[in-house]
Amino acid sequence: MKNKPFVMIGGGGHAAALAEILIKQKKRIVGVVSPELTAGNILFENIELFLNDDDILKFRPEDILLVNGIGSMPYKSLREDVYNRFKKLGYVFATVIADSALVSDYSTLECGVQIMNNCVVNLGCKVDENTIINTSTSIDHDCTIGAHCHLAPGTTLSGQVVIERNVHVATGVNVINNIIIGHNTIVGVGTNVTKSIPSNSIVYGERSVIKGLGITHDC
Amino acid sequence: MKNKPFVMIGGGGHAAALAEILIKQKKRIVGVVSPELTAGNILFENIELFLNDDDILKFRPEDILLVNGIGSMPYKSLREDVYNRFKKLGYVFATVIADSALVSDYSTLECGVQIMNNCVVNLGCKVDENTIINTSTSIDHDCTIGAHCHLAPGTTLSGQVVIERNVHVATGVNVINNIIIGHNTIVGVGTNVTKSIPSNSIVYGERSVIKGLGITHDC
Amino acid sequence: MKNKPFVMIGGGGHAAALAEILIKQKKRIVGVVSPELTAGNILFENIELFLNDDDILKFRPEDILLVNGIGSMPYKSLREDVYNRFKKLGYVFATVIADSALVSDYSTLECGVQIMNNCVVNLGCKVDENTIINTSTSIDHDCTIGAHCHLAPGTTLSGQVVIERNVHVATGVNVINNIIIGHNTIVGVGTNVTKSIPSNSIVYGERSVIKGLGITHDC
């Protein structure tokens, strides 16, 4: 099982970041599935390129592990749709943990969870399938995170936070202890979350102010 | 001295996080003192449970090191009270530094300081007794932090910041260079601190806005 | 080339932080150039002190690598001026990467770039000369950062961000994907950047509110 080769779905920045993590771990990637490569071309140059998702069907489910390299964006369901389609067909999505991340032995990650560089997942946490814990995110003890979420880079969760499924937490969000964020919610960049949020919400902080410096005028 | 066993005070999430750090370092925990265990039960399952603080008196001060596993919350003095009581009785509180943290050889930590996972403490810093530097907090050069403080997860201090005693810095706070934060102050989640703060203050940023997404209505 | 000794310019906190990183890497520092040492005195105590920038001329450019230990502050050009002066004279500024930082093999750093403790630079990034990536900053895939920038501690850049030359990004700033920040811009502490910013701008978030706690009045 552990020696199965990997097939990467997606050819953008998230796929490339995952590929670098896997290659460092001496994992073997035997295919990348994407209509085009827009990042990490050097990483993929000796790996066979498949242009259509249907090409995945050329591999038997028991022979490979899939890696969902499609990035997660608010209002876009492509990442989840691809996951669900191939899961139903019997394929298994690899759980990826970067060597530079720290995941407690007392936490559990479901299939397809991706823990990117420099993350912390402290003890007592549960992360459900196909969720991305992105670069330098810190998750404290006893948090529960649902399926198909994205915690963008630099997110900080205090202890005992619950994030339900399909939540998009944008870059640099801070969440205090014991908060519940309902499913299908979008938390905007750098929002400070100090109370629980109902499902299907959008939450954001104050907008920043842009002024001219008044020094030079060459822009 | 270095081989003394540890007795953990507290049975919640902070105690469990500390216990995991110590167990990774092959430290021996011979007792946990708490009316109940609310986190990390697996970690404590082979460790004797004591229900009352007075049970600590069964150990001689010279035989053990205490670990203050009581979490720090604003307006609550339990953590400090327990520390002071047992310090007066001659007990010593262990200084705990997670293996994943980076603490400069040119900084000093007093008794009972706890540096949790993935923290940085750069050179020239002083951290006084019983203070928690929580997960993924970054402290730059030449900062001075008083006793009984809590820097919650994801705090970032620039260089030469002074934080006096009994300050609670909530999750994700950012502090620029050369700031002084007076004692007994509470800095709210994600606050950006750009000027010095008098003692006995509460400081907070703008509140975030929550709206419905208008997509579905099942909440 | 790799065995050339280093000469540190500057005697404050940034110089000391760089010196600690280099000393850990067994690099040899043969001189520190500063009218006075204001930090890290222990680190420099066996290193010859030179009081004037002109003393650098006592070393031949081919014999040493310079390290720009002058901190970067908004509206101050000293760091850049010193870099340009000695570069024109044929000196080379060392690229410094802390052991605790993670820099992708698929990113490029120009001369004089400084990657401080606990930073991440993911794949596909380019960082131009004399730029500081300060403590615990996280830079995601495919970012481009110009010359003479300072990303202060705790900055988080999502993927594909472009920061032009001479930009000061203050502590704890968060930037979403695909943003362009024009040259000569200052981004204030903890700002959440959600749209591109013209050159020569100043950008900042809402100010925080300070109130008395109403508990004691000894400040």
Image: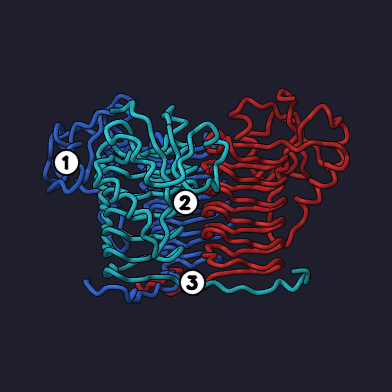
Chain colours: A blue, B red, C cyan
Residue assigned mark 3: B208
Report in which chain the residue with disc 1 lies: A
Q: Position of residue B109 (x, y in %)?
A: 66, 41
As shown in the figure, which amino acid type bears the numbered disc 3?
Ser
Label whose residue precedes the other's in the sequence (2 or 1):
1
In this view, the mark in front (2 or 1): 1
What is the CA distance from the residue labelled 2 to the residue labelled 3?
Answer: 21 Å
Residue at screen point 61% across, 73% down: C210
Left/right of residue A104 with respect to residue B31 in the rendered view:
left
- Chain ID at mark 2: A
Circle 2: is it few (<14), some (14-19), or many (20+) Cα within 10 Å?
Answer: many
Front-most of residues C215 and C33: C33
Mark 2 lies on a secondary structure that is strand
Q: Residue at x 78, y 53 (%)?
A: B78
On residue A41, the disc is 1
Q: Quadrant of residue A41?
A: top left
Q: Which residue is pictured at 39% across the width and 47% down the height?
A: C53
Q: Amino acid at mark 1?
A: Asn
**Residue pointed to by mark 2:** A145
Q: Secondary structure at mark 1?
A: helix
Disc 2 or disc 3, which is closer to the eye? 3
Residues A177 and C197: in front is C197
- The residue under the point 63% across, 51% down is B144
* Chain where mark 3 sits: B
Q: Would residue B1 be seen by someone viewing this image from the given angle?
A: yes
Residue B75, image x, y percentages: 73, 62
Q: Is residue A129 visible?
A: no
